[in-house]
Amino acid sequence: MTRQQALELLHTHMQNANLRRHCYSVEAVMRALAKHFGEDEELWGIVGLLHDGDYEEVKENPELHTIKMAGWLKEAGEANKELLSAILSHNYSHTGQNPPHNNLEWALFCCDELTGLIVAVALVKGRKLKNVTVDSVLHKFPVKHFAAGVNRIQIEMCQEKLNLKLPDFIDLALKAMQSISSELGL
């Protein structure tokens, strides 16, 4: 699957601009993580782009999240087991199935929440990612009422599962998101 095909699939099933921007953020971070680990940037980026692509259609039934996307991918002729497994692993917390088991899947698990925290910090920093620093994210990280829906434990697993220290993980993610700030409207 090409990025263009993935974008078309995402845009067919996701209309909300903010949700699309979240997917673009995760894609950028996943590409940066793939580069860091010497992995396939295209594959990792597509996983990031599509990880929440079925959310609008399954938000009332979270146990179906990612299962629908995997089905759409198969219908489109996608047979890459690594891609399908990574998509399915994203909903491990709801289904208890397909736990993350490799760098690709753990990267998605950890960075998904981090992108939300970085956006929240940007919103209080003049709505601009260029105003966000690693220190400003780290400053807000322990403040539980700030971006209360962000699972900090999931982000911190970057240290154990990806062997990336939290400040380094934030730096990598922030730079990736800043590189597409115009697409994100931030």
Image: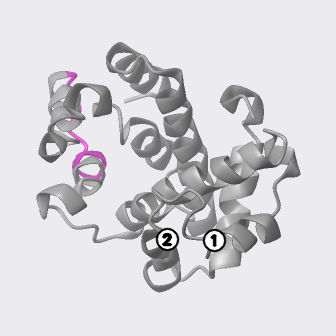
Mark 1 touches mark 2? (CB < 8 Å): yes
Asked if 115 appears above or below 70 in the picture, the reply is: below
Q: Nearer the viewer, residue 58 or 9?
A: 58
Mark 2 surroundings within 10 Å by alpha-carbon count, few (fewer than 14), some (14 through 19), many (20 or more): some
Dot label at residue 152: 2
In the image: residue 33, left or right of residue 6: right
- Which segment did they paint magenta? 76-84
Q: Residue 145: x and y, percent?
A: 56, 64
In the image: residue 99, left or right of residue 119: left
Residue at point 73%, 65% (across, down)? 171
Q: Residue 109: x and y, percent?
A: 39, 62
Instruction: Work out whether mark 1 precedes mark 2 in sequence or the reverse, and give the earlier one.
Output: 1
Residue 80 inside the magenta-drawn segment? yes
Q: Quadrant of residue 173?
A: bottom right
Q: Quadrant of residue 114?
A: bottom right
**Residue type at the position of mark 2:** Arg
Asked if 113 appears above or below 67 in the picture, the reply is: below
Question: Quadrant of the image for the C terminus?
Answer: top right
Label 1 belongs to which residue? 141
Asked if 119 appears above or below 57 in the picture, the reply is: below
* Helix, strand or loop at mark 2: helix
Q: Nearer the viewer, residue 103 or 97?
A: 97
In the image: residue 92, left or right of residue 19: left
